Amino acid sequence: MATTTNYGWTTPNDTDLVKDGAAAIRTLGSSVDTTTKALNPSTTLGDIEYRSATANTNTRLGIGTTGQVLTVAGGVPTWATSDDANAIQNAIVDAKGDLISATAADTPARLAVGANGTVLTADSAEATGLKWAALPSSASGLTLIDEVSFTASSTINVNDVFSSTYTNYRILLSGSSSTGSNANWTMRLRASGSDTSTNYQTIRIYGENGAAGSDTNVFGTDEIALFQVGNSSYKSGFGTYDITNPNVATQTGITGLGSGATSNTASTQLAIIHAQQTDSTQFTGFTILSTQTATGTVSVYGYKKE
Amino acid sequence: MTYKITEYFGLTKETIERSATAEEIVEIKAREQEQLDLEMAKQTKAEAKSALLERLGITEDEAKLLLS
């Protein structure tokens, strides 16, 4: 018996007798029917077929439900529920610069853009674990602790600016003294709201009236000499001082440079000082004293430890 | 004359101004006197220097030259 090329259906040979024609046609028809049904197993509106593992045999895939999408599972097509609910929707962002973050697993959330110049910073306390924050200051350098202004004062007590947060400090001092006579600005360290007025040792090198000089404890050991301001109408003083270990239970060092400017050149002074307070007191502040009433500002900075 | 004290408290960031106490006034005046004494000592020294230069018949620059 002969067969067809593609599906192997049986057909009569060229030499077969005519009386066998009906049987041959029936056999061929049955083969065509079987093959066609194997290739088209659909039974319902919307059914589709895909090739099975058996040659010339398709597998029926019934129509899916509304909203399902055709996907692949286990190497064959299948209908599956759309995952749109878990997709990131357009509506999650509201404004220019918004970011998509997450508040938990599988939970996206909007993070609005920060202010100009801020940077994105991790912060576990935030809902999204992120926040916009000001640029961090450098790991080292000076941090302004406090700035104190004073007017026509004989004494400026600055309390509670030294602590264990910093080991070393810088004090910037600027101001002017009232007229009348030369004014000397001095300093004492403080603890528990009281000045310490003993055990200072001050070495001073100064330039004054075109000459240089030096002295030790020019105002005694009860205070630290900073600089002199003259007695004429234009009389300003400026000082920069580093304070070492004021809040550490050891000796405290004070080193710096001060100048007293004035239109009276005879009274102009530049003074470099180094002083020590030899107690082991943990000082929390300091006092600026002027022999004429003073107006100005004192700024206290801490040296970062990093 | 009234003397004013400025006090700053870092914990509360508060600044107050008050009049000096009698004890503080005594100390302030003592420091003012100390300053005046220092000025006087400087002036006395300068006058002595000028008198010496005059007695020697030389100027200050000439004295510096001699000592250089």
Image: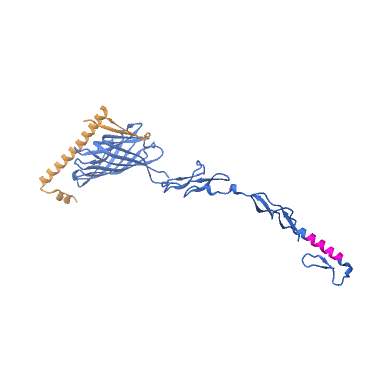
Q: How is the image coloured?
A: by chain
At a point 84% along the width and 65% down the height, the residue shown is A25
At a point 16% along the width and 42% down the height, the residue shown is B46
B16 part of magenta stretch:
no
Instruction: From the viewer's side, name the closer residue of A8 and A162.
Output: A8
Instruction: From the viewer's side, name the closer residue of A292 and A271.
Output: A292
Query: Can residue A283 be spotted in the picture?
Result: no
Q: Quadrant of the N terminus of chain A?
A: bottom right
Q: Image height check: is A172 above or below B7?
A: below
Q: Quarter-wise, where is residue A289 in the image?
A: top left
A32 part of magenta stretch:
yes
Is residue A222 rendered to the left or right of residue B56?
right
Colour that chain A carries in the picture: blue
Q: Position of residue A124 (x, y in %)?
A: 51, 42
Q: Quadrant of the C terminus of chain A?
A: top left
Instruction: From the viewer's side, name the closer residue of A278 and A291.
Output: A291
Q: Position of residue A121 (x, y in %)?
A: 47, 46
Query: Can residue B31 be spotted in the picture?
Result: yes
Instruction: From the viewer's side, name the closer residue of A84 and A14.
Output: A14
Q: Quarter-wise, where is residue B22 in the image?
A: top left
Q: Position of residue B13 (x, y in %)?
A: 36, 35
Is residue A189 rendered to the left or right of residue A89?
left
Judged from this view, the residue extending furthest toward the bottom is A15
Is residue A279 rendered to the left or right of residue A96?
left
Tally the numbered discs. Answer: 0
Magenta span: helix, strand or loop, mainly? helix
Q: Chain drawn orange, letter?
A: B
Magenta range is A22-35
